[in-house]
Amino acid sequence: MEYRKNDIVTLKIEDCGIDGEGIGKADGFTVFVKDAVIGDTVKVKIIKAKKNYGYGRLMEVLTPSPYRVEPKCAFARQCGGCQLQALSYQQQLAFKERKVRGHLERIGGFTHIPMEPIIGMDEPYHYRNKAQFPVGRNKEGKIVTGFYAGRTHTIIDNRDCALGVKQNKEVLDRVISYMEKYGADPYDETTGKGLVRHILIRYGFFTGELMVCLILNGKKLPAEEKLIASLREIPGITSITVNVNKKRTNVILGDELRLLWGQTYITDKIGDVTYRISPLSFYQVNPRQTQKLYAKALEYAQLTGEETVWDLYCGIGTISLFLAQQARFVRGVEIVPAAIGDARENARINGIENVEFFVGKAEEVLPEEYDKNGVYADVIVVDPPRKGCEEKLLETMIQMQPKRIVYVSCDSATLARDLKYLCGKGYEMERVCAVDQFGGTVHVETVTLLTRKA
Ligand code: SAH
């Protein structure tokens, strides 16, 4: 049967798509329904129809799924941040495991997948140590901050995100009342005018140190000292900075950072290693699960103390320093200069001397070092952003013939693509483990061990 726009249909949701949407069938016609949960029977209105499939808007849950739970956040449905809050956490984990396996099968072409059980969180809320809140005005002209609604840049006024730390609200309340009182205008994306673009907050779970960075379309804030005085009253605050970004872009941070008060960084710990984190550097957002993720990566690396290791996409040296405790020597590569500054400082404050860091693109630094200096690796660790590795990098990795490759990935689709390449050229997938770092959302981290076939 064919359906058309505006038709109303009743469906049983039987599957979940990679973006968390429910999938059901009506007489062979597949319908994707945002906010519907596996096991629900729902009434939907078709909003877009193709020949064999379409998209439906959830009108009513007729029979709720046994997996349905009450989201903690009142904005869970509108907000672009969470897709799975209405699904029980156990089922979220099952979904993520299926998603990774599905990508490895369909994109990677693997038939035998040596997958270990997914490592979940003890508490899937309030786990994020970082948040970047956009600032704007609502229709009434009031200053608002929160998160973007799904697929738009409309700001949902919510200062108390259920994934973030409780300190976020206090910081936001203070920054917004300062802005109202001293005439610091929010930035307007459509006109490019206004000053305050985003409020970045980072919290050290282990140290209790709190960072606030205001991202500005300009250099200076009015009555800066008033903002500083207000924020300094918050317990734990150690870093207040401004970042300048005058570009008309969706990229949040600019390059220029200015200290307003305290230090330009906070410190935090993972395991025994202390890390210094600046606003410009990448740092894993879920520190408790990161420890489990790195422990898995370390386990897969099988270090005895004799190995030479390359850690590509090393950020502030988090994995590098973790591995250096059990390797002979670790070399890290990262594109953001400030992150490498942090990485070197992190090595120093931890007294770790068997590491060296390079600034540059992994796909340029490694081939260059290999061609010029014939560098060697027993183990290569990669932890790329969502787009995965460039083929040039994978090619050099193959030439270097490390015994093991540990691939840490935040996007199982690009992971599957890259593993297909590596496993087509002499490597074998030996172990795979998903580690959930992002409860409430469809995202998941995966660690994979590849070994060189003899
Ligand atoms: N391993 C680190 C960081 C992983 S996130 C950790 O666990 O904390 C990915 C990192 O890759 C980011 O720090 C990003 O700045 C960096 N990056 C992005 N593209 C890159 C490239 N082409 N070459 C090297 N690093 C890159």
Image (cartoon, rainbow, N blue to C red):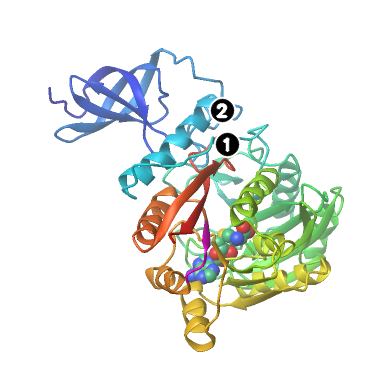
Mark nearer the N terminus (1 vs 2):
2
Ligand 1 placement by image quarter: bottom right
Query: In this picture, is 359 found above or below 251?
Result: below
Query: In this picture, is 365 found above or below 210?
Result: below
Q: Residue at x 78, y 54 (%)?
A: 269
- Please state the extent of the stretch shown in magenta in the rendering: 401-406
Q: Residue at x 76, y 72 (%)?
A: 345
| 41 left or right of 180 in image | left
Q: Which mark is residue 89?
A: 2
C-alpha gap between disc 1 and disc 2: 7 Å
| 159 left or right of 454 in image | right
CB of residue at label 1: within 8 Å of ligand 1? no
For the residue pair 12 and 350, the one nearer the viewer reads as 350
Q: Which mark is residue 397?
A: none
Instruction: Mark 1 and mark 2 in contact? Answer it, CB < 8 Å.
Output: yes
- The answer to which image quadrant residue 113 occupies is top left
Q: Which mark is residue 439?
A: 1
Residue 219 in view, yes or no: no
Query: In this picture, is 302 found above or below 168?
Result: below
Q: Quadrant of the C terminus?
A: bottom left
Within 10 Å of disc 2 (Cα), the crowding (few <14, some 14-19, many 20+) is many
The secondary element bearing badge 2 is classed as: helix
Q: Position of residue 420 (x, y in %)?
A: 35, 56
Q: Position of residue 399 (x, y in %)?
A: 43, 74
Q: Amino acid at mark 1?
A: Gly
The secondary element bearing badge 1 is classed as: loop
Q: Position of residue 355 (x, y in %)?
A: 70, 73
